[in-house]
Amino acid sequence: TVRTKLIGNEEEGEYILVKVDKIQHKIPLREICFMEGYGDFVKIHTSQEVIIGSGSLKYWMEKLPQTGFLRTHKSNIINIHKHLKLKS
């Protein structure tokens, strides 16, 4: 069973809760590198692990902060704070 809880907020920053089987994963948004969509499921890639959660990429784009995440393809969302490099 895979379940997701909406974004919460604590002193350490915003996070998502993803329940996979009987284990609940608390994933700080700053740790998410990118997400890959697979229909109604998503692979959440962090700097430490990959977690498979429920919800389409459309669902996640509605829940994630608009300023930190960008949908680059129909099956990918990236954390722009992890991937954006500016040239001066």
Image: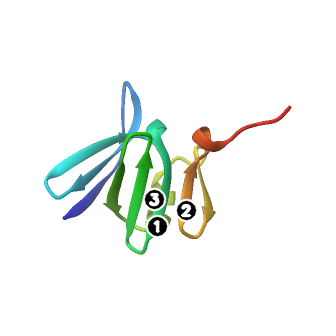
Query: Above or below — where is 41 with respect to 68?
Result: below
Quarter of the figure with residue 10: top left
Discs 2/3, front: 2
> What residue is pinned by disc 1?
37
Q: Residue furthest bottom?
A: 39
Colouring of the image: rainbow
The mark nearer the N terminus, 2 or 3, is: 3
Is the N terminus in the top left, top right, bottom left or bottom right quadrant?
bottom left
**Secondary structure beneath label 2:** strand
Q: Residue at x 82, y 35 (%)?
A: 87
Q: What's the residue type where badge 2 is placed?
A: Asn
Q: What's the residue type where badge 1 is placed?
A: Gly
Residue 76 numbered mark, or none: 2
Residue 60 numbered mark, or none: 3
What's the CA distance linking mark 1 and mark 3?
10 Å
Q: What's the residue type where badge 3 is placed?
A: Trp
**Secondary structure beneath label 3:** helix
The mark nearer the N terminus, 1 or 3, is: 1
Q: Residue at x 38, y 72 (%)?
A: 40
Q: Residue at x 24, y 62 (%)?
A: 2
Left or right: 67 in relation to 41: right
Quarter of the figure with residue 42: bottom left
The mark nearer the N terminus, 1 or 2, is: 1
